Amino acid sequence: MRISIKFKFSIFLAALLLLTVFILSLLVLEGIQKNQQLEVEQYLAQQGATANVYFIQTLMAESNKVPHTFLAEKGKDFAGQLELISGHSVVVYDLQGVIMNKDKSSMTSGSISKTLAFALKNKTAYLTDNDSLYYMTPLKTGNEQVGVVQFNYSLAKNLAFYNQIKKLFIYIGTGVFLLSFILAYFYFNSFASKIIRLNAAVDRIREGQFEIDTLARKDEIGELSEGIRDMSEQIMRTMRDKDQEREKLTMAVHKLSKLDQQQKQFIGSVTHEFKTPLTSIKAYIDLLHMYPDDEELLETAKTNINSETQRLYEMVEKVLQLASLEKYDFEFNKEKIDVQQAIEFVLNSLRGKLDKFGLRLETVLTEAYVEADKDCMTIVLINLLDNAIKYNKANGHILVISEIKDGRVIIEIADSGIGIPEEVVHKIFEPFYTVDKNRSRENGGAGLGLSLAKQYTELQGGSIALVRTDKTGTVFRISFPVYKPT
């Protein structure tokens, strides 16, 4: 629900003015209250000091100068004289908290008892109850406490003054708020009206009505109005020019885009598929240079080089067929494939490369079968495993797991490599996209491996996904339906 800017301005002004008046009133009233409290405390402190001086003077004038005996015998007279001096009702207590000059049953409230207990510990305390304040201060001779004197002080005048000031602030604050709100409302309303007009002009432009009027203002809003008009005119000119060229370019762009996409996919696919067996052959040749006297390695290399050469020859034949037929997709020959054997075949073809980089391989393979094109299955596995080797860390490891779950064969390939940055994860299956350009050139990557793996996997009814990637490595998962005999 859209809220009008006028309403927002009004609410903001009201809230701002209310907050200002409230905070100002609160601060002033709090200052008055604290000042009243300070004055009362100072006044009663003076009365307490006067009571102690008068107590000592009275005691010295007596023949019996024992303070405790004096309070017991003449505490009532002393309290009466003190009331005449201070002008306030006075209660005198001995050290046991016993009242010396009043009816004992009249002063037994729990709050006063707690305050008295505090004062009997040679400390000053007071209790506020409605409009009365009970101020208790020690009665001492020298440094020795002999009792407590309580002044009953009326706060009625202070409260009346505070309430009067409070009402005054309410009346004045209400008047200031209303006057300020009215003046500010009319001032900001002019801005809001112009902004609403500009918004209406933008809506007309959005609807295709490009002829608008400008606002006669000599400020930023006026400049904005002129800018919107200039923008509208420029849009009109641009749209006229674009309409003239659109028809001419549409078909040409469509044809060029389609041709370019087909050409890139064809050349990229052919190049990448040629590179895959050559990578295995080169790895074995490098290994033979490193260990020329290893007979077992020589036999393994011969077998795998011969196998990869044959596969390369078959791919050349397919490329020639595609070129002659002007096709851009390989024809699939689906058959029952033993997943465990397919994985082991690919791992054996990459064994030389694994040893070259000192990588540790771990497999947990389960017997399972899928219906897929053998060559395409091999290409998918080689692309994922080749990436796990190329982008691994020195002396790292690769884990290959296959299992059957929920009617599907799951293959996971995990490495301890450099990982893929989170911000480019969504691009890794795009053709010709490489995460690290420098490392791709160093390892011969063309950015087609994952794209081809995704294409071949999905065309055979499977799926491929990036399960996890971080600084500790990357995990890819491919999934195919379990083979079901017809």
Image: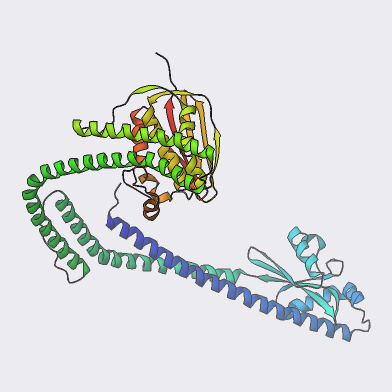
Q: Is residue 199 left or right of residue 289?
A: left
Q: Quadrant of residue 13?
A: bottom left
Above/below status of 380 relative to 230: above
Above/below status of 323 relative to 49: above
Q: Is residue 114 left or right of residue 263?
A: right
Above/below status of 353 relative to 364: below
Q: Position of residue 334 (x, y in %)?
A: 35, 23
Quarter holding the C terminus is: top left
Q: Is residue 88 left or right of residue 179?
A: right
Q: Is residue 477 visible?
A: no
Q: Position of residue 40 (x, y in %)?
A: 65, 75
Q: Is residue 409 left or right of residue 49?
A: left
The colour mode here is rainbow
Q: Observer-nearest residue: 55 or 253?
A: 253
Q: Position of residue 446 (x, y in %)?
A: 33, 47
Residue drawn at point x = 11 percent, y = 44 percent: 252
